[in-house]
């Protein structure tokens, strides 16, 4: 069985997605969970680029534009997420996710 | 093809190592390497602009934020590892991840995807700019608003509740030069 | 002015002649390697020369002669101290390379290498002459700043891997500084990209060609927004390259030597080199964006090859860096960040608006052009004065009671 | 306005930068091996022995090996051995002279006490500029020959002081000569001594 380039790209992105998923599910450190989510976003970006590259009408550049937006949103997500991590740290003196159970500050 | 496989392997390996290591700084740095690998992938695919944006945003900015967060949130003592809990979670994660990966692989291999490697499409920066400012202008505005709000939100969240340190300094700075620090009051 | 004169194409002809000895498949690779080697060799020797020139300039500013002893070894010939860089180099290379016991050995080793690699990468898109640009990229400016942004990572690695509290503190400071000043740096470049309509460095230089009244150049720095942008770029570039007065990361009075504390010998030399490379790259970018790149300053001087003009402008800018270093004392960290966020960033945003006005009023003709110039200048001068007043509020000139 | 201070500062340094090239008076650096800083007249360190002339330093030392300085030297860095014979000094009077006169400059602390106590103006403070040697022991132990320097040298390093010393010595010698002349005249007036001294 031979794989085409597109299939390779998709396999790459799904592997990346699953890595991020596993990290987000298994690690107890909030920062690493955030980074796992970040990896999943990146995997989605890889898909966009792959389908733009091998898709039927690459001249539309929609995939590229979408990735640019995704990067911007991911940057916002990372900034807010890490600010949340710091806020959690100030309240409970560590950043273990399973201990962040209180809604009151 | 070979280049793609190489890039994918390096990216996946560094991402996997980042997710497995206990040292958070090493994790963050390895993750940065994997982000750089993604930029290499974008370059390979012909999306120059996206690759540079990826490096600028991820390697230049997000990695810094992550490193700052790691250094600002070091626990006073090493976190105690609770094996049963961790093991269970790891097992659940492994099973879920493996299942999702299996579904993905099955779907990818069995779908009738266009197998022809078309000549690499190029999108000029000008074209991209016109797209962004034309068809996607609304989205661009929304993203701008989102980034501004996110910036403000992050500042508010991360800001400490303490009195601003600069307050007392400002009092000192505000006085005309040569006057004593405290008002002399009614002293003769 | 002959764009294809033999002098203008000289370096390319030499390259083609050298490459012609090789079989066809290897030519492309050999050509690229030659270009890389040329850039690295040129800037490595410029680095060696700069270390000497900098010490000379600093000395002259303090009314000292500066290093003038080392010339040709084993003779009495001194050559104004031109052998000094060689002597320094030998000293650096033969020094013991110390790695702290608790350091993170891999990262400790990788940090200087990464820093130098990223610094060299930034040279790839700078047009050194009319035909001399290592890589012709459509998004060249973006590439430059992406590669430049990655140096922050190397600084962090150096600070963290040393396992020294001063190194770590300095690395964090360096990061805060680099991130703060990345913003005005990029914002000062945006008007140029906006007005030139391209992200390609060669395109930006070519757009600054042409002569007013057939004599004066049309560089960006001679427009109101260009002058303001250049000033902001200059200040931000000083901070980005850790130069005085923004050399807080290595403030030796507070932080020993910052992230370089635990480095010695060859690795220290690499850091030093990377710092100068970064400075050269930023100056080269400043020349490209604002000072007309390789364009001649007056129309009748255009017969001199373009790369000589680029080199002259680069040296001028580097000398300006040294001049500033010789003059201004180091800032405090709060002053540093306040300058970036409360002065440079708002001013750069105002400048963006002025550039938009300039672009919209491009079709004004005749005497109205002067009005356009004046309006743009006023639009910048007002915010400058207001922001400056805000920045320096309450800071009266210091009164020295006991000094005469 | 913001920036005016920066500009005036830059103007100052630019003036220095340009000025140091066309105005040599700005460059105060003394480039040592070729040039040497002019030491102030009052500068003094390490003693030397004064001799009357440069042609025969050993023959015309003012030192009469009285050993007062050797005894007074706080770190005891002077070592003197008296000669067995006598030589005429500047006035022609027969005097002892130091057969050995060593100063260990690694011990000497330049306190000038030897100079203060010397009744013959024979030891004076020097102005040694480069005091480094390649050898810790012998090169720092100065012999009589190394220590002896002519009076003319003394005049170059401490002109005022040397002039005073010379004037004082001249008056002393004149007084001594007059006294000798008077004594000789008295002797001549007196009856001839039984045995005249042998001709020198």
Image (tube, coloured by chain):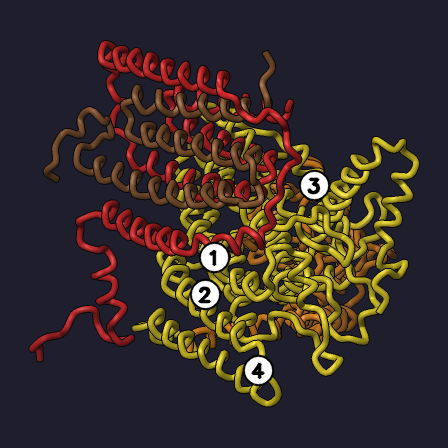
Chain A: drawing colour: brown
Q: Which chain: yellow?
A: C
**What quarter of the picture does the N terminus of chain B occupy?**
top right
> Looking at the colours in the rendered structure, which chain would you say is drawn in orange?
D
Looking at the picture, tell me which residue is in the foreground, B175 or D43. Answer: B175
Q: Which residue is mark 2?
A: C348
The quadrant in which the C terminus of chain B is found is: bottom left
Tell me the colour chain B is drawn in: red
Q: Are marks 1 and 3 on the same chain?
A: no
Q: Chain of mark 2?
A: C
Could you say whether the residue bearing mark 4 is in a helix, strand or loop? loop
Q: Is residue C294 left or right of residue C168?
A: right
Q: CA distance from mark 2 to mark 3?
A: 40 Å
Q: Which residue is mark 1?
A: B134
* Label 1: which secondary element: loop
Q: CA distance from mark 4 to mark 2?
A: 24 Å
Q: CA distance from mark 4 to mark 1?
A: 26 Å
Where in the figure is residue C69, as x and y percent of width and height? 75, 53
**Residue at left 64%, top 53%?**
C280
């Amino acid at each position: 069985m031979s794989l085409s380039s597109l299939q390779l790209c998709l396999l790459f992105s799904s592997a990346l997605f699953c890595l991020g998923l596993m990290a987000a599910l298994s690690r107890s450190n909030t920062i690493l969970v955030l980074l796992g989510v970040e990896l999943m976003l990146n995997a989605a970006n890889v898909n966009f680029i792959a389908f733009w590259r091998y898709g039927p009408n690459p001249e539309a550049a929609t995939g590229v534009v979408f990735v640019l937006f995704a990067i911007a949103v991911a940057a916002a997500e990372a900034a807010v997420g890490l600010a949340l991590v710091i806020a959690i740290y100030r309240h409970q003196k560590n950043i273990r996710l399973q201990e962040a159970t209180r809604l009151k500050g | 093809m070979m280049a793609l496989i190489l890039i994918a392997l390096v990216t996946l390996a560094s991402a996997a190592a980042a997710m497995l290591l206990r040292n958070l700084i090493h994790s963050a740095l390895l993750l940065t390497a994997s982000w750089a690998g993604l930029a290499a992938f974008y370059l390979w695919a012909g999306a120059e602009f996206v690759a540079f944006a990826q490096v600028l945003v991820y390697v230049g900015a997000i990695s810094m934020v992550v490193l700052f967060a790691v250094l600002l949130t070091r626990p006073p003592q090493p976190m105690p590892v609770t094996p049963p809990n961790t093991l269970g979670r790891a097992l659940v994660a492994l099973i879920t991840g493996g299942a999702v990966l299996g579904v993905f692989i099955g779907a990818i291999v069995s779908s009738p995807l266009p197998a022809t490697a078309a000549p690499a499409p190029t999108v000029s920066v000008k074209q991209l700019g016109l797209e962004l400012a034309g068809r996607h202008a609304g989205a661009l505005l929304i993203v701008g608003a989102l980034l501004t709000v996110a910036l403000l939100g992050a500042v508010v969240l991360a800001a400490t509740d303490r009195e601003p340190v600069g307050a007392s300094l400002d009092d000192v700075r505000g006085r005309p030069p040569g006057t004593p620090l405290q008002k002399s009051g009614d002293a003769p | 002015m002959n764009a294809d004169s033999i002098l203008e194409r000289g370096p390319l002809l030499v390259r083609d002649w050298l490459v012609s000895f090789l079989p066809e498949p290897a030519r492309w690779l050999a050509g690229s390697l030659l270009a890389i080697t040329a850039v690295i060799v040129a800037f490595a020797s410029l680095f060696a020369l700069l270390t000497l020139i900098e010490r000379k300039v600093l000395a002259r500013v303090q009314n000292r002669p500066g290093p003038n002893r080392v010339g040709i070894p084993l003779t009495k010939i001194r050559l104004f101290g031109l052998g000094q860089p060689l002597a320094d180099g030998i000293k650096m290379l033969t020094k013991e390379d110390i790695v702290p016991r608790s350091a993170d050995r891999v990262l400790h080793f990788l940090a200087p290498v990464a820093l130098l690699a990223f610094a060299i990468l930034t040279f790839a898109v700078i047009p050194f002459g009319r035909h001399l640009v290592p890589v012709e990229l459509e998004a060249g400016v973006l590439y430059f700043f992406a590669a430049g942004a990655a140096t922050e990572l190397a600084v962090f690695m150096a600070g963290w891997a040393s396992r020294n509290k001063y190194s770590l503190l300095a690395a964090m400071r360096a990061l805060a500084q680099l991130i703060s000043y990345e913003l005005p740096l990029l914002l000062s470049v945006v008007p140029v990209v906006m007005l030139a309509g391209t992200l390609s460095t060669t395109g930006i230089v070519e757009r600054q060609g042409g002569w007013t009244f057939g004599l004066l150049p049309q560089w960006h720095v001679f427009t109101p927004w260009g002058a303001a942008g250049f000033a902001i770029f200059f200040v931000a570039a000083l901070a980005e390259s850790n130069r005085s007065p923004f050399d807080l990361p290595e403030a030796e009075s507070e932080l020993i030597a910052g992230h370089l504390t635990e480095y010695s010998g060859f690795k220290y030399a690499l850091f030093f080199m990377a710092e100068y490379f970064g400075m050269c790259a930023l100056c080269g970018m400043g020349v490209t964006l604002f000072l007309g790149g390789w364009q001649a300053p007056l129309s009748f001087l255009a017969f001199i090859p373009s790369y000589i003009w680029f080199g002259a402008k680069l040296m001028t800018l580097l000398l300006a860096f040294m001049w500033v270093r010789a003059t201004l004392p180091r800032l405090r960290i709060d002053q540093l960040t306040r300058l970036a966020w409360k002065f440079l960033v708002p001013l750069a945003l105002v400048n963006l608006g002025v550039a938009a006005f300039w672009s919209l009023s491009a079709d004004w003709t005749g005497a109205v052009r002067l009005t356009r110039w004046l309006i743009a200048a006023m639009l910048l001068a007002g915010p400058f004065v207001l922001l400056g007043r805000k920045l320096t509020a309450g800071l009266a000139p210091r009164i020295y009671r006991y000094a005469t | 306005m913001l920036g005016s201070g920066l500009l005036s500062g830059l103007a100052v340094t630019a003036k220095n930068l340009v000025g140091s090239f066309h105005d040599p008076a700005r460059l105060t650096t003394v480039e040592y091996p070729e040039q040497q800083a002019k030491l102030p007249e009052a500068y003094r360190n390490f003693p030397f022995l004064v001799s009357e002339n440069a042609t025969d330093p050993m023959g015309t030392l003012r030192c009469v090996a009285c050993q007062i300085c050797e005894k007074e030297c706080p770190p005891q860095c002077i070592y003197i051995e008296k000669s067995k014979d006598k030589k005429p000094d500047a006035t022609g009077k027969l005097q002892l002279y130091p057969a050995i006169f060593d100063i260990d400059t690694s011990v000497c602390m330049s306190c000038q006490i030897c100079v203060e106590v010397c009744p013959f103006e024979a030891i004076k403070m020097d102005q040694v500029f480069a005091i480094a040697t390649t050898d810790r022991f012998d090169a720092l132990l100065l012999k009589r020959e190394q220590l002896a320097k002519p009076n003319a040298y003394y005049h170059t390093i401490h002109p005022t002081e040397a002039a005073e010393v010379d004037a004082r010595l001249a008056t002393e010698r004149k007084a001594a000569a007059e006294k000798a002349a008077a004594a000789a005249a008295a002797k001549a007036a007196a009856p001839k001594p039984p045995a005249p001294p042998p001709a020198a």
